[in-house]
Image (cartoon, helix red, strand yellow):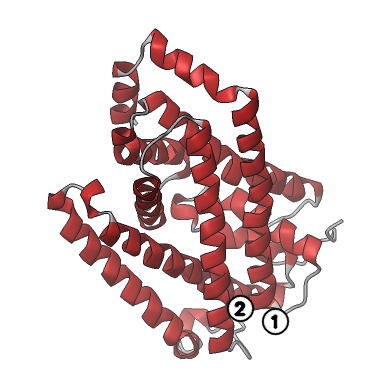
Amino acid sequence: MGLLAQRLYQSYSAENMASVATIFNQHNTLLILLCTVLMFLNWGIEVYKWGLITQPMEIIPTRKLWQSVWMGVCIGNLTPGRLGEFAGRILTFKPHNHAKVTTLHFVNGVTQLVANIVVGCAGLLGFSSLIDKSYFTLMLIAETLILIAFVLFLIRINYIVKWLQKVSFLKRFDFTNLQIDRMLLLRLLFLSTIRYFVYFFQFYLLLVACGVHGNTYHIFGAIAIMYLLLSTIPMISVIEVAVRAFIIVLLFGSFGSNDWELSVASTLLWVINIVFPSVVGYVFLVRNKFTFGTKQRKHDLA
């Protein structure tokens, strides 16, 4: 946060601030609104994925799936790396399914990470000039190892579930009939890839709105590398927006835009894709008086 603040301070000038003010003209506002509309497609694909993977356990109406996903976003923002997201998602399911649904949540998340890393590594290889040579090889090796670990996890997931049932402190949880079909995993990976390109295009729209110009292919490469980094760097929610902004400033600083414009693009993406769903998720949590106790909730989702 300090490094970002220093760069913003150094780039402060009347000219730079005037360029930030022009972001919100009529044309750019339309681009930002389009990005906002795409947010619903982005999360709609995630809701569909969530329904697919949980359907064998429990069939949940679509509107409740939306509530489940966005409550997860809300609670996930309170934990490092959004690891607590499952706690919000399981609330719409029956208590005896919580352990199985939690497992399915992490499987679903891994399919999205695999898609992010595969496309990100392709961007890294195609646009290695955007990364300092001293970091490129190390970064590629690290991402490849992470990808291999995630793929092995998906391939062996049913064996992992059987192992979980044998762990002493997990025996009190019900994992009965938890089997994940490989065709389902392929469908989830396909949908995750589509979702990736939706939020890829969202950020491209915001970059255009914020005055980032340059070779389109280089911009695409920088976006791919950005999402690769954001997908695999653990972040605490309270500093996430600053970390996002700093990565974007580093990657896109060579495209002729000032740091303020890039920071605005980063912040808008965060507000549209994360803050708005979190606020709505919080409303669902409060309205339905959810608790995290072991007893069944008294109020059904409206």
**Res. 84 in view:** no
The residue singled out by tag 2 in the image is 100
Give coordinates of residue 22: x percent, y percent: 53, 19
First-in-chain label (1 vs 2): 1
The local secondary structure at tag 1 comes to loop
Give coordinates of residue 278: x percent, y percent: 64, 45
Is the residue under label 2 in contact with that under label 1 (CB below 8 Å)?
yes
Residue drawn at (52%, 74%) of the image:
189
The residue singled out by tag 1 in the image is 57
User: At label 1, which amino acid type do we have?
Assistant: Met
Residue drawn at (28%, 59%) of the image:
126
Number of disc labels: 2
Q: Cα distance, mark 1 to mark 2?
A: 8 Å
Mark number for residue 46?
none
Residue drawn at (37%, 28%) of the image:
257
Give coordinates of residue 48: x percent, y percent: 68, 68
